[in-house]
Image (cartoon, rainbow, N blue to C red):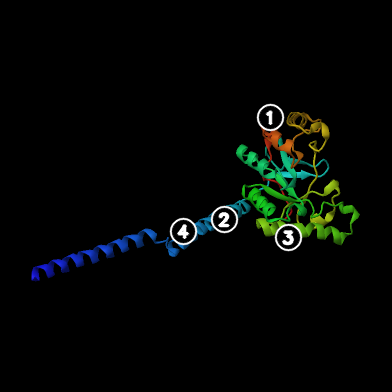
Amino acid sequence: MITKVVVMFVFASLLLIGCNNSGSNQTEKKEPKSVETTTTIQDETKQEQDMKEEASKTIRNSEKENFQAEYRLNKENWSFEPIQDAEPKVVLLTFYDAPDKYSLEIAKTLQKLQVPAIFFVNGHFLESDEKKSMLKEIHDMGFSIGNRTYSHVNLKELTEEEQKREIVKLNNLVEGIIGERPKYFRAPFGSNTEVAANEKMLVMNWTYGYDWEKEYQDKKALTGIMLNSLYLSNGASLLMHDRKWTREAIEDIVKDFHKKGYKILAKLIETPE
């Protein structure tokens, strides 16, 4: 009788231990990811992003401290001339209407080719978070951002106070997006005024451009005219737009300029202090 009781007791104990182990295994399998671990991963990702942004700021600040201008704007013909012994055979690439539809793709192509450019913006292209993000990406890729007024208006039809509002409003907006105020200014319709100069921006104009003309709205025709314009000269300031055919042509345009012995003007332009 005692033996029977002992056997039953041992069997019951073994059964109880098995149930406990089974429950433990189920708990382990169903246990969700630790909130603490997830938070740590998110913190690390944010920390990496912050470190990248800080590194980018450090590089830009270092560039500013060590900056020495090599080219100066000639306001008689709007071209750029060497200040001392810099290479004279250069052209400057500038793009309007950024960041509409194709500016980011154009910027990526230029980055691949390792050439600089200035992207001029209007405020009405920056009224959505998506476009603001695109502009920041273009800037973070190393490209300069220029001011072309908030509303794309003819400044000469406005009062001086209205002109200032058009220019300063866009400067404030751009600074809020990229952390810097534009250093370059181009007025719509070429109607420059001294208000921009008072805002410590380099007031510029262009040497030539064609991509808004119907006969040059394809890759081959645009490439041909940009490389063979009668107005092409050392230091020429080339005007292009955020257009499909411009996006398609830009790689060939850059490569063909290089073949002709032209360098693309880097960010070595003298600007107002």
Query: Disc 4 marks which residue?
Result: 41
Left or right: residue 114 versus residue 94 is: left
Q: CA distance from mark 3 to mark 2?
A: 21 Å
Q: Where in the figure is residue 234, as x and y percent of width and height?
A: 75, 35
Q: Earlier in the sequence, mark 3 or mark 1?
A: 3
Q: Quadrant of the C terminus?
A: bottom right
Residue 19, label in figure: none
Residue 172, label in figure: 3
Q: Earlier in the sequence, mark 4 or mark 2?
A: 4
Q: CA distance from mark 4 to mark 1?
A: 47 Å
Instruction: Specify whether residue 266 is in view.
Output: no
Residues at discs 3 and 4 in contact (Cβ within 8 Å)? no
Query: Disc 2 marks which residue?
Result: 53
Left or right: residue 80 versus residue 57 is: right
| Residue at image coords 69%, 52% | 131
Whether 72 is drawn above or below 124: the answer is above
What amino acid is at disc 1?
Asp
What amino acid is at disc 3?
Asn
Whether 219 is drawn above or below 93: the answer is above
- Picture quadrant where residue 107 is located: top right
Residue 256, label in figure: 1
Residues at discs 3 and 1 in contact (Cβ within 8 Å)? no
| Residue at image coords 68%, 56% | 129
Callout 3 environment at 10 Å: few (<14), some (14 to 19), or many (20+)?
some
What amino acid is at disc 4?
Ile
